[in-house]
Image (tube, rainbow, N blue to C red):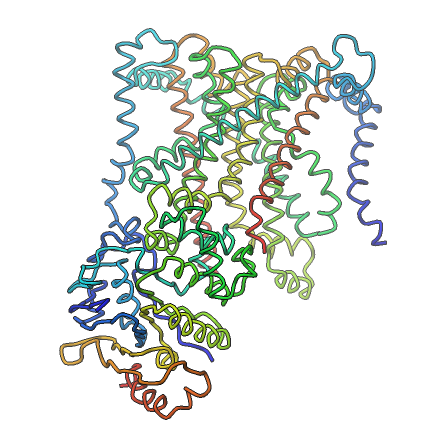
């Protein structure tokens, strides 16, 4: 006997941004049922704690911490950042880091996706490759910095190589998982229609995994940036990481913190951008379905 | 009077869900509340427990206005799976109620055992919720509520998500429990037969109340003898008469 | 045919090693960059003290591995403890979360090694500096996982806590943290990876004894076989630590699988 669907009392369903219902105080729902704040209030709340810390830092570095090699007043940091922008070094450094990260991601991530799709489509290939992948994957990408240094010296190729290695594995794993999750019936349809393997990949598999690929891309972008900056701090005398390292070694705390702030901004921006891209793609794909 | 509803009204999203309703529940009574979707029966139960405050009127328990949840009132949720801690075993889930009540650790095992024995889950005391069937999970929740030794047991369509056979056996178990322990129960359901079978009194609510047709459509005593039987009681002419009388209140009028 | 299927995977691995052997012996790649497999093995065996000989380098790899692993584990434990503690404090309070979440989201994409120059100016070039950066970098996955896990407690459980009148502390300890445990363990695994990476980088930059410094020196001296031996060891450390953690995770989360 099918019972009619149970009544759904509004109080039991979690909802964000719902106007506060009367008498809701003290209910379990009150935490996330607080009314939606306007964007201006939300922004000011987000900035409140950081601004407070900056004010404290400014006060400290102008008084007790005046001669510190590590800290500098935030106002000086901003000035240093502005100077770097004005003399072009900001753009050069950022360009190098982003460039090597992008090229490395394209190379490593691209190969990883292709191989991942291949392994996802063929269970046999996945089985055969399992051990080799499990042996090579745990190698930390930073361990390859000295090797890359040995082979390429310093410069773009060395950094690109390490980024490529670092982004290859996660994108391989994610692409393989995404491909394995493609509706098996779709693949049967492809076989029934007599599509060639290439057509199968292009017309069925790729469109099906695109949303997941963009999620993987988001991860890849984050890893690429982190690895690129790490290579620059550890060895490669180019890019944002090196500029920051150099500032520290020259006992220029304002410059060092300026670069640190800039790296944070770039990282945040890339993350936000790729998340927005990924969401837009997901929405577009959902709409098509 | 254990529980008094004094002109309790509920507004949600700007609409009146429940018009001011008054009734009382006496000690040891089993009151069932039925009604179609949207009549506010679950919200009424939650207001009586203290999860929400009513928009108008008051709920009083033993003369005191209900202002929030209390350990004296045990609430059995319909989605039993979500109300149990999946990382704790059956016994540990029951123990949560005792821990909350600051029962000394030495006394807990005995009380847990007793309560599990009452609901018939003693052999499964060390299993995790994921290993249990729906009916058993619901019994764990009931066991935890019993461990609270509550004055009042509030049940929100507790058997709604279970299959018919499990539902019937749990109904009988609940009736037996309530009788043995002398509990006072407020039981919300959309199943008319269940309400008549279990209750001493059935309250029927309407959706979309207005001045001429308030939420409280009917309040009917159920004079059927106890202990009740799934077969015999449901063939009793009195049962059938009550069923006919209340049927029209389930959104058919 | 099926019976031999399990051999296919090791077969590929051996084939790759064979390819490596041919490439180096056949001069497809210079031995300056890529050592022969047997040279790598020799460096590895000597460095681990498995074979006699090897001069004063014998057994050195054992010390380096111990140093790096010790650093990684210490940093990871510290990071996990701090991450859970701070995460619990932030996650337990709606207001704290509302005010701090945006700042946390800003710090999250920041590379852990990026704070190393700052740490150097504060702590100088020392093992303590590396440990501090490791702990800082590895803390975030655990912290964010804890905050998220605490926030994702199902409303039904919150109501159960209310009905039982659990105290705030009890709610965090008995419901919030256990609920967050799957997330926390996943975060701790990520933390371990970060911890290894930052330890190695730290050793390279701050010239602290360990595998990081060892392979950097090997590269500078063009000793390819030692470089590869060190890389292989780092890979093993990564593999073993991840596998151990995965096993622990499975044990602790038994209740998820009936």
Left or right, residue C36 beside residue A245:
right
Residue lying at the far bottom in this picture: please name it.
B237
Asked if residue B110 is positioned above or below residue B24 in the image, the reply reads: above
Asked if residue A241 is positioned above or below residue B99 in the image, the reply reads: above
Observer-nearest of C65 and B156 = B156
Picture quarter with the C terminus of chain B: bottom left
Observer-nearest of C220 and B19 = B19
Residue at horizontal 56%, vertical 56%? B127
Residue B29 visible to an observer of this rendering: yes
Q: Position of residue C95 (x, y in %)?
A: 29, 40
Q: Position of residue C162 (x, y in %)?
A: 32, 52
Left or right, residue A237 beside residue A116:
left
Q: Position of residue B123 (x, y in %)?
A: 56, 61
Residue A152 visible to an observer of this rendering: no
Image quarter for residue B160? Answer: bottom left
Residue lying at the far left in this picture: please name it.
B211
């Amino acid at each position: 006997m099918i019972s009619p669907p149970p009544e759904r009392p509004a109080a039991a369903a979690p909802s964000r941004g719902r106007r506060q219902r009367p008498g809701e105080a003290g209910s379990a729902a009150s935490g996330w049922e607080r009314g939606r704040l306007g964007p201006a209030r939300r922004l000011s709340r987000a900035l409140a704690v950081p601004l407070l810390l900056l004010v404290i830092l400014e006060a400290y570095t102008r008084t007790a911490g005046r001669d510190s090699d590590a800290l500098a007043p935030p106002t000086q940091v901003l000035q240093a950042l502005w100077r770097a922008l004005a003399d072009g070094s900001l753009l050069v450094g950022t360009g190098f880091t982003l460039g090597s990260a992008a090229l490395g991601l394209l190379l490593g991530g691209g190969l990883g996706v292709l191989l991942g799709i291949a392994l996802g489509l063929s269970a046999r290939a996945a089985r055969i490759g399992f051990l080799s992948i499990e042996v090579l994957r745990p190698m930390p990408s930073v361990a390859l910095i000295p090797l890359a240094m040995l082979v390429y010296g310093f410069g773009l190729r060395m950094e690109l190589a390490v980024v490529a290695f670092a982004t290859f594995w996660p994108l391989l794993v994610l692409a393989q998982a995404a491909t394995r999750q493609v509706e098996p019936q779709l693949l049967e349809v492809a076989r029934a229609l007599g599509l060639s393997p290439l057509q199968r990949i292009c017309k069925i598999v790729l469109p099906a995994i695109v949303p997941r690929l963009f999620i993987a891309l988001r991860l890849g972008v984050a890893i690429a940036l982190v690895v690129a900056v790490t290579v620059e701090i550890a060895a490669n005398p180019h890019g944002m990481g090196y500029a920051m390292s150099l500032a520290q070694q020259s006992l220029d705390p304002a410059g060092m913190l300026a670069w640190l702030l800039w790296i944070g901004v770039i990282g945040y921006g890339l993350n936000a951008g790729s998340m927005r891209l990924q969401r837009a793609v997901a929405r577009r794909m959902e709409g098509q379905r | 009077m254990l529980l008094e509803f004094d002109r309790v009204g509920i507004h949600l999203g700007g609409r009146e869900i429940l018009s001011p309703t008054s009734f009382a529940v006496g000690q040891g009574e089993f009151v069932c509340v039925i009604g179609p979707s949207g009549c506010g029966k679950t919200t009424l139960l939650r207001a009586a427990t203290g999860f929400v405050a009513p928009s108008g009127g008051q709920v009083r328990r033993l003369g005191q206005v209900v202002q929030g949840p209390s350990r004296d009132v045990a609430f059995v949720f319909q989605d039993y799976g979500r109300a149990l801690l999946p990382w704790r075993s059956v016994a540990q889930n029951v123990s949560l109620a005792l821990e909350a009540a600051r029962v000394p650790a030495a006394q807990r095992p005995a009380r847990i055992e007793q309560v599990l024995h009452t609901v018939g889950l003693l052999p499964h005391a060390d299993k995790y919720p994921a290993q249990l069937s729906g009916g058993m999970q619901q019994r764990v929740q009931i066991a935890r509520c019993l461990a609270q030794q509550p004055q009042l047991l509030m049940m929100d369509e507790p058997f709604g998500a279970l299959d018919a056979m499990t539902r019937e056996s749990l109904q009988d178990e609940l009736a037996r429990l309530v009788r043995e322990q002398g509990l006072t129960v407020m039981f919300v359901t959309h199943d008319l037969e269940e309400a008549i079978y279990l209750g001493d009194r059935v309250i029927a609510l309407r959706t979309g109340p207005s001045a001429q047709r308030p939420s409280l459509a009917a309040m009917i005593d159920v004079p059927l003898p106890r202990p009740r039987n799934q077969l015999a009681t449901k063939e009793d002419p009195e049962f059938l008469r009550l069923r006919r009388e209340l049927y029209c209140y389930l959104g058919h009028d | 045919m099926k019976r031999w299927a399990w051999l296919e995977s090791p077969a590929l691995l051996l084939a790759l090693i064979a390819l490596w052997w041919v490439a180096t012996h056949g001069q497809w790649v210079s031995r300056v960059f890529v050592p022969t497999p047997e040279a790598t093995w020799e460096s590895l065996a000597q460095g681990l003290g498995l074979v006699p000989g090897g001069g004063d380098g014998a057994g050195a790899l054992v010390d380096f591995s111990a140093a790096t692993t010790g650093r990684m584990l210490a940093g990871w434990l510290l990071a996990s403890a701090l991450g859970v503690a701070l995460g619990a404090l932030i996650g337990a309070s709606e207001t704290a979360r509302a005010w701090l979440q945006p700042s946390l989201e800003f710090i999250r994409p920041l590379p852990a090694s990026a704070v190393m120059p700052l740490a150097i100016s504060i702590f100088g070039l020392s093992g303590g500096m590396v440990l501090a950066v490791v702990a800082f970098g590895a803390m975030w996955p655990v912290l964010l996982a804890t905050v998220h896990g605490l926030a994702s407690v199902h409303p039904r459980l919150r109501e159960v806590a209310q009905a039982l009148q659990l105290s705030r502390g009890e709610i965090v300890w008995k419901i919030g943290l256990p609920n967050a445990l799957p997330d926390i363990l996943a975060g701790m695994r990520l933390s371990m990876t970060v911890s290894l990476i930052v330890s190695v980088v730290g050793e390279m930059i701050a010239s602290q004894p360990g595998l990081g410094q060892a392979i950097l020196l090997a590269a500078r001296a063009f000793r390819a076989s030692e470089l590869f031996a060190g890389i292989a060891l780092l890979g093993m450390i990564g593999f073993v630590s991840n596998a151990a953690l995965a096993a622990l995770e499975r044990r602790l989360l038994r209740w998820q699988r009936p």
